[in-house]
Image (cartoon, grey):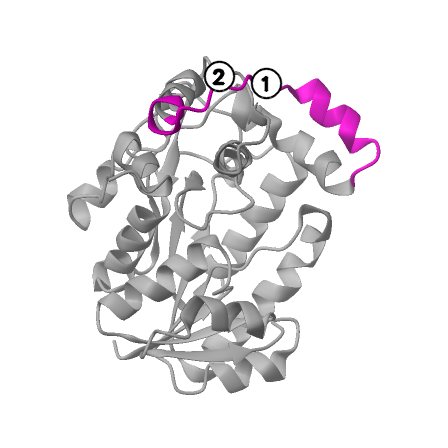
Amino acid sequence: MKKVLVLGASGNMGAALVKEFCNRGIEVKAFARNKEKLERLFNNEERVEIVQGDLFNQTDLLHAAQDVDLIVHSVNIPYQEWKKLPVLMDNVIQTVKKYNIKFAYVDNIYAYGRSVGKKMTEDMPKNPHTKKGKIRLQLENMIKNSGIKYTIAHFPDFYGPNAANTLLYTTINAVINNKKAMFIGNPKLAREYIYLPDGAKAFVNLVLNEKAYGQEWNIPSYGPITGEEIIQMIREFTGYDKKISIVTKRMVQMVGLFNPFMREFSEMFYLIDEPVILSGEKYEREIGPLPKTSYYDGLREIFQIK
């Protein structure tokens, strides 16, 4: 593989993927709407070509994809606009078909629905009960029924360098700025968060392996961890001694009366109360060992503790 097009290259996983592909000696077209942000992220990367464009504009996408071997879809849009996601996905699929190239999709765990009390494997039935979970399943079925050469990777929540707009970012960013911090959800429940560089490495391993195509893959984290354990590590690394407030579902619902994003976010709070944990058995059996950075080392890196 010589060149890839990463859609959503200015986002959390998109940016991590651009850097990982470059680390493997692969040229990258980094595609997003915000050219200034792309330039801030990748100006020092020799293998990156910055492409400003709109995925809802088929011409922009066709122009960007005309000389690549693979399109990576890592785009996300605000919850309140998710009804537009099938249109975006159709644009991408039609572009992949036109050029007869490979396709790889960065997906979350919404389509699985509620936890079944054990680790989720790829062959378990998907029973989404939320609007957003049903949309994600629709997108997945669009890919599978398209006839293109695809691979789909499911990830839990991200954390790590530059991981804005994530659950842990709310806590970490406040601590970094020595402001009053909040933790979203019950801190006694164990959930999983994947370190962004680990997720990017695992994903690139997938797309470079021919056996990964025509299938979906779960990419889990280092393992489940409670909020209390995370907070204890953060306090150890930083000396942060302010009280950390707990954000409950009821609080999110109250804010949602005035905030469209929080109103949509409250629907997904079940993932915080009933954590879904992914199994990586298939990946490790078919692809190889999963990259796994401990939370201790991952958090140390975020806070730049040597």
64 in relation to 190, above or below: below
* Location of the N terminus (image quadrant): bottom left
Q: Mark 1 and mark 2: span between their CA atoms?
A: 8 Å
78 in relation to 242, above or below: below
| 240 in the magenta segment | yes
* Location of the C terminus (image quadrant): top left
- Residue 226 image point, x, y percent: 40, 19
Per the image, the residue denoted by label 2 is 187
- Residue 134 image point, x, y percent: 61, 42
Q: Quadrant of residue 48?
A: bottom left
Q: Which amino acid is tagged 2?
A: Pro
Labels 1 & 2 near each other (Cβ < 8 A): yes
Using the image as rendered, state which of residue 95 and residue 172 is in the foreground: 172
Q: Which residue is the extreme one toward the right?
A: 258
Label 1: how many residues lie within 10 Å, few (<14), some (14-19) or many (20+)?
some
173 in relation to 25, above or below: above
Q: Which amino acid is tagged 1?
A: Ile
- Residue 149 image point, x, y percent: 37, 68
Label 2: how many residues lie within 10 Å, few (<14), some (14-19) or many (20+)?
some
Q: Considering the numbered disc 1 on the image, is that residue within a helix, a strand or a loop?
A: strand
Per the image, the residue denoted by label 1 is 246
**Residue 15 appears left or right of 300:** right
Q: Which residue is the extreme one toward the top?
A: 188
Q: Which residues are magenta?
A: 234-259
